[in-house]
Amino acid sequence: MQIVVEDMKETRRNLTRFLGEFKRCVKAKYNRAHLRTYVEGQISDLPRKSIEPIALAADVAPRTLQEFMGLHRWDEGAVRRRVQRVVVRDHADPNAIALIDETSFIKKGAKTAGVQRQYCGASGKTDNCVVTVHLGYTAGDFHALLDGDLYLPEQTWSADRERCREAGIPDEVVYRPKWQIALDLLDRTMANGVLFKYLVADEGYGRFDAFRAGVDARGLIYVVETDRNQLGWTPRALDTIAPPARRVDQLWKRGGPSWQRFRIKNTGNGPVVWEVRATRFFPCEQKDPGKECWLFVARNVMDGELKYFLSNAPADTPLEVLLHVAFSRWHIERVFEDGKGEIGMDHFEVRQYRAIQRHLVLSMLSFLFLVCETQRLQKKRSMDHLPGAGGRRSAA
């Protein structure tokens, strides 16, 4: 019990030091107090982590915390940039991977900025929800969120500027396809000094030629999923006269590259094993062959699930490297799962655009602290169980 109390005290001291990194972003003392209240609420064990329960648990008037999120003057953009710089300072890696994905939040009514009936991953069906696009970061066993932005539907929101103004959406914020939001997040983050080597995304992004070309133009190696109806040609097919482009799931009815078996990772239920076949490939772009890239097809040996990937990696890149990058996408899924389950990323009840953006930024900040503190405690626990640490264990 003594060690637990000591850990809690150390966590509070670490939180004070951590939030001290953001003093220049939140200059007013009363706003820094609200910032701590919000972050403490998000990393607490409160069952609901929206503004009112966070405020009441901290003996703060809910209205003042609402005003902090929506009205008070502080620079959420500077907070976001500082989060990114802390990640670069403490977790820079020459093989860092950019993680692109979206998440959704079920909402009632029609007033929340960006809400409409659309596919909602949170419920697995078409639902009334808000969708946000995010950029994550992973290096080794570390992962974090670096940026995020609201997806603004075109017809129901962007085309209705009066509705946008009622929700506090600036006139310059207009509809962008999700893949364009992803590229904009990448630009904003890389301009702040964050370096990546690789990028991963699911087929919702990887199937767009413009997205892949944009990532390539930014100097990153992408390994992205694509649809089974992706069209293109193998080098051998292009040797023939005017061959028609073929779907990737129709390329090898007979023959083709051999399946190679790879152990992707070990789990409590045993190893996860996929079979892979790979070739160089020219994706069809505007009916013509695009830039040569990798195409590989992965098949789960347990259930037969198929995934199709494209990558602009050099031709001599080992297949093991491509697979490691491709299957690193679980990190962003875990970030969303922990972000919603541990810090209440989906508990926001604000409706105005700026308050939502601030909630996303503060959720990034809270998540970063939680990940770093969890790693510290795990390391401490492992040290406590090393030979020679028995006396310390008995003190508990």
Image (spheres, rainbow, N blue to C red):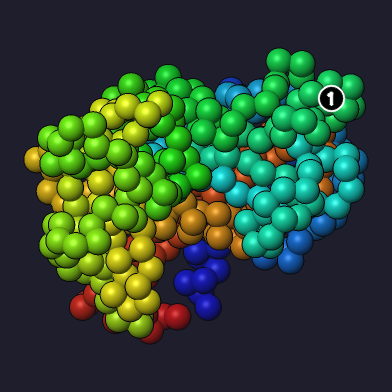
- Residue furthest front as drawn: 241
Closer to the camera in the image, 37 or 144: 144
Label 1 SS: loop
Question: Which residue is denoted by mark 1 in the rendering?
Answer: 160
Residue type, numbered disc 1:
Asp
Dividing the picture into quadrants, the one containing residue 363 is top right
Above/below status of 180 relative to 225? above
Residue 124 in the image, given as x and y percentages of width and height: 65, 62
Residue 177 visible in the snapshot: yes
Residue 104 in the image, given as x and y percentages of width and height: 66, 50
Image position of 20 (left or right of 218): right
Seen at 33% across and 78% down, the residue is: 302
Residue 335 in the image, given as x and y percentages of width and height: 50, 54
- Residue furthest left as drawn: 316
Q: How many marks?
A: 1
Seen at 23% across and 31% down, the residue is: 242
Seen at 30% across and 81% down, the residue is: 270
